[in-house]
Image (cartoon, rainbow, N blue to C red):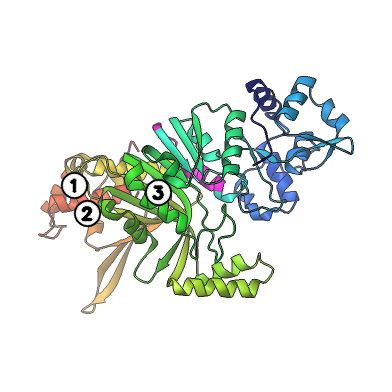
Amino acid sequence: MTFPLRLGAPEDFARVGKALRTPPFSEGAVHRVLREAGQSVLGLDAAEPESAAPHKPDVFLQLFVELKAVPRAEVERGMDRATLESFLALDLIRPTGADAYESPVFLYPVGEMLIASDHYNKSLGADSVFPAIQTGTLHLLKLMPRSPAEDALDLCCGTGICGLVLSRTARRVVASDVTARSAHFARFNRLLNDCANVEIAAGDLYSAVEARSFDRIVAHPPYVPSVEDAKIWRDAGSTGEAITRRIVEGLAKHLKPGGEFFALCLGSEQENAPYQQRVRDWLGEAESEFDIIVATQKLLSPQELAGQLAARESHPEEKAGLLERAFQEARVTRFCYGTLAVRRHDTPGARSWTMRTKLTASTTAESFEAVFGRSRECAQRSLVEKMRLGPAPGVKATVTHTVEETRFAASELALETGFPFEQSIRLQSWLFPVLKLLDGVRTVAEVFAQARAEHLVPEKCDLEDFASLAAMLAMQGYLTAPSQ
């Protein structure tokens, strides 16, 4: 098969990379050009443009972002002959019959990398390489782990952007995609960014790495519900979960102890079957070895999602009806869009936990790392008892009083936080005066001893129970140590 772009000599990639890494050709400038072109589908409002001023004409922006034919004289005036020859050798630009140059690909900076892909304005075929400069990818790049790792895997890699970014902190990276076109573009992008520790593979999910396991796995799988699965880069079965489910099912075999998995995905919920429980079921017999965080960005009813997807079609009412019937057959009550994070225990016999929360503007990769890190610390009761915990900044406590025998009595305690996740928890009211004793100076064991002496805790509550509760609240970000 013939694809655009050629995997040329290292010196050609070096010249092209140096030429493209110039101030006019910046991520902020690319965002402005796309907004001006009406590419609202990108959802780039979360990105910070460099300036509100209109962009000045730039040869690279015209060639690679606007996909314009640019006069030869204008292109050749901006670079020396050797650099021009390198652009031609890599098939990044081609001469046209109108004494001009044009590009066959979309090329742009994102995640501090230079990335080539297919363009939104072109008809995206079944195996097109979806652009990396869009909401979902930017969201995943913000939230995926940044800590050091030995071996990392980028599944459904597309352009390879996640694998290339992972290569900064992982010793070895495999970026894999099912289509030969994506693998070709990913190889080109690896060479353009000089990421020598990235291996590009082509295969159906784990088939390309069958006998290998990894410390870190990330995925941006197709997750759009579809009744025909016409486009590989987009469609994922009637509820959008077909690919995500297969990836999760393979974690028991391919994720090492202590390893983490991150994915951007759309999940469906059924009555009495929330998405996080369905993910745990997909893990199979090894589910007790994994902790799960489902952090949602938005919730959609089946009717809302069907309407949004059908609005892009030529016969929206017919398409919406087909999707709604498919959702009904699957007994879907709600869809949740967001980040799925899974960690495998590195301590035998550790108790597994599941967390459902909401993403906020302040949520980062470090937010997930902090939760998983606290869970490792809190896995040992003896360590929890020695922790000096206090309320985390921004936590709000509300005590509800109800009338009991003509008098107001505290009946419920609610804790809320918006950093780094938006979440709340309801507890028994007797805990409020006890939690007030946690000041970050005394240990959990010392606070419990005082609460016991002042008769603030029920007789059936012992230190182990209190330490478990404190560990849970610390893990979810309601309590923290002063040094944190």
Q: Considering only vertical position in the picture, is 19 above or below 215? A: above
x and y percent of residue 70 in the render?
84, 37
Q: Are marks 3 and 2 in contact (CB under 8 Å)?
A: no
x and y percent of residue 208 in the render?
45, 41
Q: Which residue is mark 3?
A: 341
Q: Considering only vertical position in the picture, is 193 above or below 265? A: above
Q: Which residues are magenta?
A: 137-150
Q: Secondary structure at mark 1?
A: helix
Residue type indicated by callout 3: Ala
Q: Residues within 10 Å of mark 2 (few under 14, many from 20)?
A: some
Residue type indicated by callout 2: Val
Question: Which residue in the rendered view is the most extreme toward the front?
Answer: 1
Q: Considering only vertical position in the picture, is 406 above or below 25? A: below
Quadrant where the image shows the N terminus? top right
For image coordinates 60% across by 38% down, the residue present is: 184
Question: Which residue in the rendered view is the most extreme toward the bottom?
Answer: 406
In the rendered structure, does residue 234 fall within the stretch colored magenta? no
In the image, which is nearer the foreground, mark 3 or mark 2?
A: 3
Q: CA distance from mark 1 to mark 3?
A: 33 Å
Residue type indicated by callout 1: Val
Q: Residues within 10 Å of mark 3 (few under 14, many from 20)?
A: many
Q: CA distance from mark 1 to mark 2?
A: 8 Å
Image-based side of 296 in relation to 482, left or right: right
For residue 447, the mark is 1
Image-based side of 127 in relation to 246, left or right: right
Q: Secondary structure at mark 3?
A: strand
Q: Are marks 1 and 2 in contact (CB under 8 Å)?
A: yes
Sooner in the amino-acid sequence: mark 1 or mark 3: 3
Q: Which residue is mark 2?
A: 434
